[in-house]
Image (spheres, grey):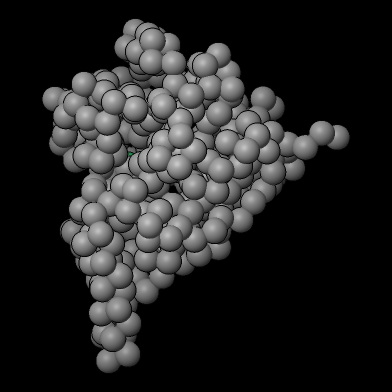
């Protein structure tokens, strides 16, 4: 048997971040994915690797030092609060909270994206999926928001540009929500092309007007189905990606545009995620030696999330 060409990066610390009972961005999301990949046998075909923690200098590739210091400070405040018998959570916005493990989890999530990037650049893997949380694409250069603290994909994209010397990378975001954090960090960087679709009028209520020439945002009306989204991808994303000729593709892989996901009102299903992934894989093979690093973002219906990740990973691994 030949070694697997698709990596699967995760870390137990990513499970310990918990924003409280009933929060949709919950540790069980990772359990659902793991279970599904195990029971279907897909896990056997992947090269499973443990993430390492990102350093502050890694995170500073995409974030203000003050933002990182603030997260670190909040973690310390939380420890003191807990020792004084206070609450276990500290909110950074209405629906985003830190517990005592959040900062460590966030560093392992970004560390997974970096480790996956290094393994792909070294030729050990063709592509990789990072099953990590907290997610990243709403995390701005200087602000945590929307369940996100550190922008895993933006950190890894800057890592490969600044440290591996690539000239052009594409960031593809198919989460139902606009990746405002990634846009905040990467808009105006001519080495990056970001293409995305997202449900119009949904949180974080941005994206209709792109913040840079290197951003291609495709707002999609609520209740659109997969075939409509596929047509928009062919029409808008593919020509720009082909013209840009990325040397590597990063995917912000959110699965909340799924028909069964209540956080959005789009109608994608597993086959759509398989199709999108195959399409990106074709582009990566043509221009980027197949190099793709995909990081989990949203996806809150546990069953739909698990099945969609399976479809995505099967397409990455040619299963
Ligand atoms: Zn989302």
Quadrant (top left, top right, bottom left, bottom right) of the N terminus: top right
User: On the image, which quarter does residue 185 sit in?
Assistant: top left
Residue furthest to the right: 1
User: On the image, which quarter does residue 176 sit in?
Assistant: top left
Residue at (21, 39) in percent of width and height: 184
214 above or below 17?
A: above
311 above or below 140?
A: above
Q: Nearer the viewer, residue 290 or 276?
A: 290
Q: From the top left corner, tell me how far across and down residue 189 is, in percent.
A: 27, 31
Q: From the top left corner, tell me how far across and down residue 188 is, in percent.
A: 22, 30
In this rendering, would 276 be left or right of 174?
right
181 above or below 17?
A: above
- Which quadrant of the render holds ligand 1? top left
Residue at (61, 42) in percent of width and height: 119
Residue at (58, 36) in percent of width and height: 121
Q: From the top left corner, tell me how far across and down residue 123 is, in percent.
A: 65, 34
Quadrant (top left, top right, bottom left, bottom right) of the C terminus: top right
Q: From the top left corner, tell me how far across and down residue 263 is, in percent.
A: 30, 41
In this rendering, would 295 be left or right of 76?
right
Q: How many marks are shown on the rendered structure?
A: 0
């Amino acid at each position: 048997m030949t070694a697997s060409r698709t990596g699967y990066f995760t870390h137990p610390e990513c499970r310990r971040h918990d924003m409280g009972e009933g929060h949709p961005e919950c540790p069980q999301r990772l359990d659902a994915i793991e279970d599904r990949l195990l029971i279907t046998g897909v896990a056997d075909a992947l090269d499973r690797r443990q993430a390492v923690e990102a350093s502050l200098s890694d995170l500073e590739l995409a974030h203000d030092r003050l933002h990182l210091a603030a997260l670190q400070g909040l973690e310390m405040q939380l420890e003191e609060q807990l020792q004084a018998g206070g609450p276990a959570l500290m909110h950074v916005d209405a629906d985003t909270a830190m517990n005592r493990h959040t900062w460590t989890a966030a560093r392992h999530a970004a560390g997974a994206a970096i480790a996956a990037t290094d393994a792909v650049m070294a030729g050990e893997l063709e592509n990789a999926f990072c099953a990590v949380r907290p997610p990243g694409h709403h995390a701005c250069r200087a602000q945590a928001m929307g369940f996100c603290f550190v922008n895993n994909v933006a950190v890894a994209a800057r890592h490969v540009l600044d440290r591996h010397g690539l000239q052009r990378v594409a960031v593809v975001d198919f989460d139902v929500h606009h990746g405002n954090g990634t846009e905040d960090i990467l808009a105006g960087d001519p080495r990056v092309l970001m293409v995305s679709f997202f449900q119009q009028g949904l949180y974080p209520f941005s994206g209709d007007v792109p913040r840079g020439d290197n951003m291609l945002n495709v707002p999609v009306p609520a209740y659109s189905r997969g075939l409509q989204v596929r047509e928009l991808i062919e029409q808008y994303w593919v020509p720009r990606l082909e013209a840009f000729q990325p040397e590597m593709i990063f995917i912000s892989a959110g699965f909340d545009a799924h028909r069964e996901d209540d956080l959005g009102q789009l109608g994608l299903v597993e086959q759509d995620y398989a199709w999108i992934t195959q399409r990106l894989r074709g582009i990566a093979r043509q221009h980027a030696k197949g190099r793709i690093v995909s990081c989990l973002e949203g996806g809150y219906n546990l069953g739909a999330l698990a099945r969609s990740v399976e479809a995505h990973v099967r397409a990455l691994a040619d299963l």
